[in-house]
Image: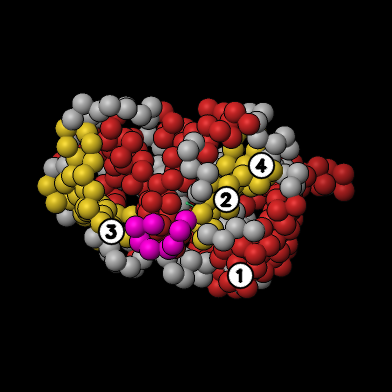
Amino acid sequence: MNRKKFIGIVGGATIAFGTASYLLSDKRNLVRADIKPADDSTKPTLRDHNETLRPDEKEILFLASLAPSGHNTQPWFVQYLEPYHWIIGNDKSKWLPAVDPTQRETMLSIGAFIQNLEYAAGDFGYICDWKLLATTHQDEQVMEVSLIKEASKNAFDISKIKNRRTVRADFLNDVLKPEDLKYLVNSEPEFIHYLPVTSQESQYISEQTIEANRLQAYRDPAQQELADWIRFSSQNAEKYRDGLTTASMEIDGFSGWVVRNIYSKDSVMKKDFRERGIDNIKKEVSESAGWILITSKDSSVATLLETGRRMQSLFLKVREKGIAIHPMTQILEESSMRQDLNQSIGISENIQFILRAGYLKNYPLPVSLRRPVDWFIRK
Ligand SMILES: Cc1cc2nc3c(=O)[nH]c(=O)nc-3n(C[C@H](O)[C@H](O)[C@H](O)COP(=O)(O)O)c2cc1C
Protein backbone atom coordinates (compact mmCIF):
# COMPACT_ATOMS: atom_id res chain seq x y z
CA MET A 1 0.00 0.00 0.00
CA ASN A 2 1.44 3.36 -0.87
CA ARG A 3 1.55 6.25 1.57
CA LYS A 4 -1.25 8.18 -0.13
CA LYS A 5 -3.58 5.20 -0.04
CA PHE A 6 -2.74 4.53 3.61
CA ILE A 7 -3.50 8.13 4.60
CA GLY A 8 -6.74 7.90 2.63
CA ILE A 9 -7.85 4.76 4.51
CA VAL A 10 -6.88 6.11 7.93
CA GLY A 11 -8.51 9.43 7.16
CA GLY A 12 -11.69 7.70 6.02
CA ALA A 13 -11.77 5.51 9.11
CA THR A 14 -11.24 8.52 11.35
CA ILE A 15 -14.08 10.42 9.70
CA ALA A 16 -16.34 7.34 9.95
CA PHE A 17 -15.40 6.89 13.61
CA GLY A 18 -15.90 10.60 14.31
CA THR A 19 -19.28 10.59 12.59
CA ALA A 20 -20.40 7.47 14.47
CA SER A 21 -19.23 8.94 17.81
CA TYR A 22 -21.04 12.17 17.07
CA LEU A 23 -24.22 10.32 16.13
CA LEU A 24 -24.05 8.37 19.38
CA SER A 25 -23.29 11.47 21.45
CA ASP A 26 -25.68 13.68 23.42
CA LYS A 27 -26.54 15.88 20.44
CA ARG A 28 -29.02 18.47 21.65
CA ASN A 29 -30.16 20.32 24.73
CA LEU A 30 -33.00 18.64 26.58
CA VAL A 31 -35.82 21.14 27.17
CA ARG A 32 -39.07 21.09 29.10
CA ALA A 33 -41.14 20.34 26.00
CA ASP A 34 -39.15 17.11 25.45
CA ILE A 35 -40.60 15.59 28.62
CA LYS A 36 -43.97 14.00 27.98
CA PRO A 37 -46.49 13.97 30.88
CA ALA A 38 -46.93 10.22 30.33
CA ASP A 39 -43.32 9.73 31.47
CA ASP A 40 -44.15 11.21 34.85
CA SER A 41 -45.08 8.17 36.91
CA THR A 42 -41.73 6.51 36.53
CA LYS A 43 -41.15 5.66 40.18
CA PRO A 44 -43.30 2.62 40.99
CA THR A 45 -43.18 3.23 44.76
CA LEU A 46 -44.99 6.49 44.25
CA ARG A 47 -47.85 5.17 42.17
CA ASP A 48 -50.04 5.14 45.29
CA HIS A 49 -50.00 8.92 45.37
CA ASN A 50 -50.76 9.08 41.73
CA GLU A 51 -53.95 7.17 42.43
CA THR A 52 -54.74 9.31 45.47
CA LEU A 53 -54.42 12.66 43.77
CA ARG A 54 -57.48 14.05 42.01
CA PRO A 55 -56.66 15.33 38.51
CA ASP A 56 -57.18 18.96 39.49
CA GLU A 57 -55.02 18.54 42.62
CA LYS A 58 -52.25 17.16 40.46
CA GLU A 59 -52.53 20.00 37.95
CA ILE A 60 -52.53 22.66 40.69
CA LEU A 61 -49.41 21.15 42.29
CA PHE A 62 -47.72 20.82 38.91
CA LEU A 63 -48.36 24.52 38.21
CA ALA A 64 -47.10 25.43 41.69
CA SER A 65 -43.86 23.56 40.98
CA LEU A 66 -43.14 25.77 37.96
CA ALA A 67 -41.94 28.37 40.49
CA PRO A 68 -38.32 29.49 40.25
CA SER A 69 -35.72 28.42 42.83
CA GLY A 70 -32.00 28.99 43.33
CA HIS A 71 -30.05 26.45 41.16
CA ASN A 72 -33.51 25.01 40.38
CA THR A 73 -33.31 22.82 43.50
CA GLN A 74 -37.13 22.92 43.94
CA PRO A 75 -36.81 22.87 47.74
CA TRP A 76 -40.45 22.01 48.49
CA PHE A 77 -42.48 18.93 49.24
CA VAL A 78 -46.19 18.45 49.83
CA GLN A 79 -47.54 16.34 52.67
CA TYR A 80 -50.91 14.97 51.64
CA LEU A 81 -53.32 15.02 54.61
CA GLU A 82 -56.57 14.44 52.71
CA PRO A 83 -58.06 15.66 49.43
CA TYR A 84 -57.50 19.40 49.02
CA HIS A 85 -55.76 19.62 52.39
CA TRP A 86 -51.97 19.67 52.37
CA ILE A 87 -48.90 20.84 54.21
CA ILE A 88 -46.27 22.64 52.17
CA GLY A 89 -42.87 21.46 53.36
CA ASN A 90 -39.25 22.58 53.28
CA ASP A 91 -37.05 19.79 51.85
CA LYS A 92 -33.76 19.85 53.73
CA SER A 93 -32.06 17.67 51.13
CA LYS A 94 -32.42 20.50 48.61
CA TRP A 95 -30.75 23.25 50.62
CA LEU A 96 -27.73 25.17 49.33
CA PRO A 97 -25.57 25.53 52.46
CA ALA A 98 -22.60 27.15 50.69
CA VAL A 99 -24.53 30.08 49.17
CA ASP A 100 -27.65 30.13 51.34
CA PRO A 101 -26.54 29.07 54.83
CA THR A 102 -29.61 30.51 56.59
CA GLN A 103 -32.14 29.15 54.06
CA ARG A 104 -33.25 32.68 53.21
CA GLU A 105 -33.46 31.83 49.50
CA THR A 106 -35.14 28.51 50.26
CA MET A 107 -37.97 30.37 52.00
CA LEU A 108 -38.24 32.86 49.13
CA SER A 109 -38.52 29.99 46.64
CA ILE A 110 -41.19 28.29 48.76
CA GLY A 111 -43.01 31.65 48.81
CA ALA A 112 -42.96 31.64 44.98
CA PHE A 113 -44.33 28.06 45.00
CA ILE A 114 -47.14 29.17 47.34
CA GLN A 115 -48.03 32.10 45.07
CA ASN A 116 -48.22 29.85 42.01
CA LEU A 117 -50.33 27.38 43.98
CA GLU A 118 -52.81 30.07 44.98
CA TYR A 119 -53.12 31.42 41.43
CA ALA A 120 -53.53 27.91 40.00
CA ALA A 121 -56.12 26.95 42.62
CA GLY A 122 -58.06 30.12 41.74
CA ASP A 123 -58.15 29.04 38.12
CA PHE A 124 -59.72 25.71 39.16
CA GLY A 125 -62.32 27.52 41.28
CA TYR A 126 -60.76 27.21 44.74
CA ILE A 127 -59.69 29.77 47.27
CA CYS A 128 -56.85 28.87 49.63
CA ASP A 129 -57.06 28.97 53.38
CA TRP A 130 -53.46 29.26 54.66
CA LYS A 131 -52.06 28.65 58.12
CA LEU A 132 -48.42 29.39 58.88
CA LEU A 133 -46.73 26.51 60.75
CA ALA A 134 -43.01 27.30 60.57
CA THR A 135 -41.33 29.55 63.08
CA THR A 136 -37.82 29.18 61.66
CA HIS A 137 -36.39 28.94 58.12
CA GLN A 138 -35.42 25.36 58.89
CA ASP A 139 -38.76 23.94 60.08
CA GLU A 140 -39.98 21.11 57.86
CA GLN A 141 -43.64 22.03 57.94
CA VAL A 142 -44.03 25.49 56.47
CA MET A 143 -47.71 26.14 55.74
CA GLU A 144 -50.95 24.21 55.88
CA VAL A 145 -53.43 24.87 53.11
CA SER A 146 -57.05 23.93 52.48
CA LEU A 147 -58.57 24.46 49.07
CA ILE A 148 -62.17 25.59 49.31
CA LYS A 149 -64.49 25.49 46.31
CA GLU A 150 -65.75 28.97 45.69
CA ALA A 151 -66.51 30.90 42.55
CA SER A 152 -63.28 32.79 42.10
CA LYS A 153 -63.57 36.52 41.66
CA ASN A 154 -60.31 36.97 39.84
CA ALA A 155 -59.40 33.88 37.85
CA PHE A 156 -55.73 33.89 36.90
CA ASP A 157 -54.47 33.19 33.41
CA ILE A 158 -52.37 30.07 34.06
CA SER A 159 -50.56 30.35 30.74
CA LYS A 160 -48.54 33.05 32.54
CA ILE A 161 -47.32 30.39 35.00
CA LYS A 162 -46.51 27.96 32.20
CA ASN A 163 -44.63 30.52 30.12
CA ARG A 164 -42.64 32.26 32.85
CA ARG A 165 -38.92 31.68 32.71
CA THR A 166 -35.61 33.15 33.75
CA VAL A 167 -33.77 34.64 30.77
CA ARG A 168 -30.08 35.54 31.00
CA ALA A 169 -28.89 36.56 27.53
CA ASP A 170 -29.47 39.26 24.94
CA PHE A 171 -31.21 41.93 27.00
CA LEU A 172 -31.61 45.31 25.30
CA ASN A 173 -30.27 48.38 27.08
CA ASP A 174 -33.42 50.53 26.87
CA VAL A 175 -34.72 51.72 30.22
CA LEU A 176 -38.14 50.48 31.34
CA LYS A 177 -41.05 52.51 29.99
CA PRO A 178 -42.97 54.44 32.69
CA GLU A 179 -46.24 52.63 31.85
CA ASP A 180 -44.56 49.20 32.10
CA LEU A 181 -42.91 50.16 35.35
CA LYS A 182 -46.23 51.32 36.77
CA TYR A 183 -47.79 47.97 35.84
CA LEU A 184 -44.95 45.99 37.45
CA VAL A 185 -44.55 48.00 40.62
CA ASN A 186 -48.31 48.03 41.01
CA SER A 187 -49.12 49.75 44.26
CA GLU A 188 -46.07 48.53 46.12
CA PRO A 189 -43.39 51.20 45.71
CA GLU A 190 -42.22 50.53 49.28
CA PHE A 191 -41.13 46.99 48.28
CA ILE A 192 -40.23 47.16 44.59
CA HIS A 193 -37.48 49.56 43.52
CA TYR A 194 -36.26 50.14 39.98
CA LEU A 195 -32.74 51.44 39.41
CA PRO A 196 -32.49 52.48 35.73
CA VAL A 197 -29.32 51.52 33.89
CA THR A 198 -28.49 55.22 33.59
CA SER A 199 -28.29 55.69 37.39
CA GLN A 200 -25.18 55.56 39.56
CA GLU A 201 -26.87 53.01 41.82
CA SER A 202 -27.39 50.67 38.86
CA GLN A 203 -23.74 51.06 37.89
CA TYR A 204 -22.76 50.19 41.46
CA ILE A 205 -24.89 47.02 41.50
CA SER A 206 -23.44 45.93 38.14
CA GLU A 207 -19.85 46.34 39.35
CA GLN A 208 -20.55 44.67 42.66
CA THR A 209 -22.34 41.77 40.95
CA ILE A 210 -19.22 41.06 38.91
CA GLU A 211 -17.07 41.29 42.03
CA ALA A 212 -19.40 39.02 44.05
CA ASN A 213 -19.38 36.47 41.23
CA ARG A 214 -15.59 36.55 41.17
CA LEU A 215 -15.47 35.95 44.94
CA GLN A 216 -17.99 33.13 44.69
CA ALA A 217 -16.34 31.47 41.70
CA TYR A 218 -13.13 31.10 43.73
CA ARG A 219 -14.91 30.01 46.92
CA ASP A 220 -14.56 26.25 46.52
CA PRO A 221 -17.58 25.13 48.57
CA ALA A 222 -19.83 27.45 46.52
CA GLN A 223 -18.31 26.27 43.23
CA GLN A 224 -18.58 22.62 44.32
CA GLU A 225 -22.23 23.17 45.22
CA LEU A 226 -22.83 24.65 41.77
CA ALA A 227 -21.12 21.63 40.19
CA ASP A 228 -23.39 19.31 42.19
CA TRP A 229 -26.48 20.99 40.74
CA ILE A 230 -25.38 21.07 37.11
CA ARG A 231 -27.00 18.29 35.09
CA PHE A 232 -24.34 17.91 32.42
CA SER A 233 -25.86 15.20 30.24
CA SER A 234 -29.42 15.02 28.95
CA GLN A 235 -29.60 11.59 30.54
CA ASN A 236 -28.93 13.03 34.01
CA ALA A 237 -31.22 15.98 33.39
CA GLU A 238 -34.03 13.59 32.56
CA LYS A 239 -33.22 11.36 35.52
CA TYR A 240 -33.26 14.14 38.14
CA ARG A 241 -35.52 16.77 36.48
CA ASP A 242 -33.96 19.55 38.53
CA GLY A 243 -30.77 21.61 38.69
CA LEU A 244 -29.18 23.58 35.90
CA THR A 245 -29.09 22.12 32.42
CA THR A 246 -27.20 23.35 29.37
CA ALA A 247 -30.54 24.63 28.05
CA SER A 248 -31.40 26.54 31.23
CA MET A 249 -27.87 27.98 31.41
CA GLU A 250 -28.42 29.06 27.79
CA ILE A 251 -25.35 27.19 26.54
CA ASP A 252 -26.30 26.28 22.98
CA GLY A 253 -24.65 24.99 19.83
CA PHE A 254 -21.14 23.54 19.93
CA SER A 255 -20.48 24.85 23.48
CA GLY A 256 -23.57 22.98 24.68
CA TRP A 257 -22.33 19.81 22.99
CA VAL A 258 -18.96 20.13 24.75
CA VAL A 259 -20.58 20.63 28.17
CA ARG A 260 -23.03 17.73 27.68
CA ASN A 261 -20.47 15.27 26.36
CA ILE A 262 -17.09 16.25 27.78
CA TYR A 263 -17.57 18.30 30.96
CA SER A 264 -17.95 16.89 34.45
CA LYS A 265 -18.05 18.21 38.01
CA ASP A 266 -14.23 18.38 37.92
CA SER A 267 -14.32 20.77 34.96
CA VAL A 268 -16.35 23.25 37.06
CA MET A 269 -13.51 23.42 39.60
CA LYS A 270 -10.91 24.31 36.94
CA LYS A 271 -9.66 27.89 36.57
CA ASP A 272 -10.78 28.06 32.97
CA PHE A 273 -14.43 27.28 33.85
CA ARG A 274 -14.41 29.81 36.73
CA GLU A 275 -12.94 32.54 34.50
CA ARG A 276 -15.38 31.86 31.69
CA GLY A 277 -18.25 32.10 34.19
CA ILE A 278 -17.02 35.53 35.32
CA ASP A 279 -16.64 36.72 31.70
CA ASN A 280 -20.18 35.60 31.05
CA ILE A 281 -21.45 37.59 34.04
CA LYS A 282 -19.62 40.68 32.75
CA LYS A 283 -21.38 40.34 29.42
CA GLU A 284 -24.76 39.78 31.09
CA VAL A 285 -24.56 42.84 33.34
CA SER A 286 -23.51 44.99 30.39
CA GLU A 287 -26.91 44.24 28.88
CA SER A 288 -29.84 45.55 30.91
CA ALA A 289 -32.50 48.13 31.55
CA GLY A 290 -31.16 48.28 35.08
CA TRP A 291 -32.02 46.47 38.28
CA ILE A 292 -35.20 45.75 40.21
CA LEU A 293 -34.72 45.27 43.93
CA ILE A 294 -37.33 43.69 46.17
CA THR A 295 -37.09 44.67 49.81
CA SER A 296 -38.80 43.64 53.02
CA LYS A 297 -39.26 45.08 56.49
CA ASP A 298 -37.67 42.09 58.24
CA SER A 299 -36.56 38.53 57.57
CA SER A 300 -39.10 36.51 59.56
CA VAL A 301 -40.56 33.34 58.05
CA ALA A 302 -43.85 35.08 57.24
CA THR A 303 -42.07 38.04 55.65
CA LEU A 304 -39.77 35.92 53.47
CA LEU A 305 -42.70 33.84 52.22
CA GLU A 306 -44.59 37.05 51.48
CA THR A 307 -41.57 38.44 49.65
CA GLY A 308 -41.23 35.25 47.58
CA ARG A 309 -44.89 35.63 46.68
CA ARG A 310 -44.36 39.27 45.75
CA MET A 311 -41.40 38.39 43.51
CA GLN A 312 -43.41 35.67 41.79
CA SER A 313 -46.39 37.99 41.16
CA LEU A 314 -43.97 40.40 39.51
CA PHE A 315 -42.20 37.63 37.57
CA LEU A 316 -45.55 36.44 36.17
CA LYS A 317 -46.24 39.90 34.76
CA VAL A 318 -43.05 40.62 32.84
CA ARG A 319 -43.38 38.35 29.82
CA GLU A 320 -46.49 40.09 28.47
CA LYS A 321 -44.45 43.33 28.44
CA GLY A 322 -41.50 41.71 26.66
CA ILE A 323 -39.35 42.17 29.76
CA ALA A 324 -36.93 39.52 31.02
CA ILE A 325 -35.88 39.00 34.61
CA HIS A 326 -32.66 37.45 35.82
CA PRO A 327 -32.15 37.03 39.59
CA MET A 328 -28.48 37.66 40.42
CA THR A 329 -28.12 36.96 44.09
CA GLN A 330 -24.34 36.79 44.59
CA ILE A 331 -24.00 40.16 46.37
CA LEU A 332 -26.54 38.95 48.92
CA GLU A 333 -24.78 35.58 49.25
CA GLU A 334 -21.29 36.97 49.88
CA SER A 335 -21.51 38.45 53.39
CA SER A 336 -18.49 40.76 52.94
CA MET A 337 -20.28 42.46 50.03
CA ARG A 338 -23.80 42.46 51.38
CA GLN A 339 -22.87 44.76 54.25
CA ASP A 340 -22.01 47.76 52.05
CA LEU A 341 -24.96 47.41 49.72
CA ASN A 342 -27.69 49.30 51.58
CA GLN A 343 -25.51 52.26 52.42
CA SER A 344 -24.13 52.60 48.92
CA ILE A 345 -27.52 52.72 47.22
CA GLY A 346 -29.40 54.52 49.98
CA ILE A 347 -31.99 51.85 50.81
CA SER A 348 -32.52 51.05 54.46
CA GLU A 349 -34.87 48.02 54.19
CA ASN A 350 -33.70 44.41 53.81
CA ILE A 351 -32.84 43.68 50.18
CA GLN A 352 -34.11 40.18 49.36
CA PHE A 353 -33.91 40.05 45.56
CA ILE A 354 -31.58 41.65 43.04
CA LEU A 355 -33.13 41.21 39.61
CA ARG A 356 -31.52 42.27 36.36
CA ALA A 357 -34.25 43.39 33.99
CA GLY A 358 -34.38 44.19 30.31
CA TYR A 359 -36.48 44.13 27.18
CA LEU A 360 -35.98 41.23 24.77
CA LYS A 361 -36.36 41.13 21.01
CA ASN A 362 -37.36 37.47 21.07
CA TYR A 363 -38.77 35.88 24.19
CA PRO A 364 -37.69 32.21 24.38
CA LEU A 365 -39.91 29.41 25.70
CA PRO A 366 -39.29 27.95 29.18
CA VAL A 367 -36.70 25.16 29.21
CA SER A 368 -35.88 24.37 32.86
CA LEU A 369 -37.09 21.00 34.13
CA ARG A 370 -39.33 20.09 37.06
CA ARG A 371 -39.74 16.94 39.11
CA PRO A 372 -43.10 15.29 38.49
CA VAL A 373 -45.68 15.91 41.22
CA ASP A 374 -45.47 12.27 42.37
CA TRP A 375 -41.85 12.80 43.32
CA PHE A 376 -42.53 15.62 45.79
CA ILE A 377 -45.72 14.31 47.40
CA ARG A 378 -45.40 12.61 50.78
CA LYS A 379 -48.07 10.75 52.72
C1 LIG B 1 -34.08 32.78 45.34
C2 LIG B 1 -33.58 32.64 43.92
C3 LIG B 1 -32.25 32.93 43.63
C4 LIG B 1 -31.77 32.81 42.32
N1 LIG B 1 -30.48 33.18 42.04
C5 LIG B 1 -30.02 33.10 40.76
C6 LIG B 1 -28.70 33.57 40.45
O1 LIG B 1 -27.96 34.05 41.29
N2 LIG B 1 -28.29 33.46 39.15
C7 LIG B 1 -29.09 32.93 38.17
O2 LIG B 1 -28.64 32.86 37.03
N3 LIG B 1 -30.35 32.52 38.45
C8 LIG B 1 -30.83 32.60 39.71
N4 LIG B 1 -32.12 32.21 40.00
C9 LIG B 1 -32.96 31.67 38.91
C10 LIG B 1 -32.99 30.15 38.95
O3 LIG B 1 -31.76 29.60 38.53
C11 LIG B 1 -34.16 29.64 38.07
O4 LIG B 1 -35.35 30.07 38.64
C12 LIG B 1 -34.19 28.14 37.94
O5 LIG B 1 -33.05 27.67 37.27
C13 LIG B 1 -35.44 27.65 37.20
O6 LIG B 1 -35.52 28.26 35.95
P1 LIG B 1 -36.82 29.10 35.51
O7 LIG B 1 -36.88 30.32 36.39
O8 LIG B 1 -36.55 29.46 34.07
O9 LIG B 1 -38.01 28.23 35.70
C14 LIG B 1 -32.63 32.34 41.30
C15 LIG B 1 -33.96 32.04 41.61
C16 LIG B 1 -34.44 32.19 42.90
C17 LIG B 1 -35.88 31.90 43.21
Asked whether residue 290 is in view, the answer is yes
- Say the numbered circle drawn on residue 339: 1
Q: Residues within 10 Å of mark 4 (few under 14, many from 20)?
A: some
Q: Position of residue 118 (x, y in %)?
A: 30, 40
> Which of marks 2 and 4 precedes in the sequence?
4
- Mark 4 or 2, closer to the camera: 2
Q: Nearer the viewer, mark 1 or mark 4?
A: 1
Task: Characterize the local packing of mark 1: few (<14), some (14-19) or many (20 or more) Cα atoms within 10 angstroms.
Answer: few
Label 3 SS: strand
Sequence-earlier tag: 2 or 1: 2
- Where, by quadrant of the figure, is residue 250 drawn? top right
In this picture, residue 84 sits left or right of residue 17 = left
Q: Residue at x 25, y 28 (%)?
A: 152
Q: Which span is picked out in magenta? A: 296-303
Q: Amino acid at mark 2?
A: Leu
Alpha carbon distance from label 4 to label 3 = 34 Å
N-term-proximal mark, 1 vs 4? 4
Mark 2 neighbour class, 10 Å CA radius: few under 14, some 14 to 19, many 20 or more: some
Whether ligand 1 has any atom under 8 Å from the Cβ at mark 3 is answered as no
Q: Quadrant of residue 137?
A: bottom left
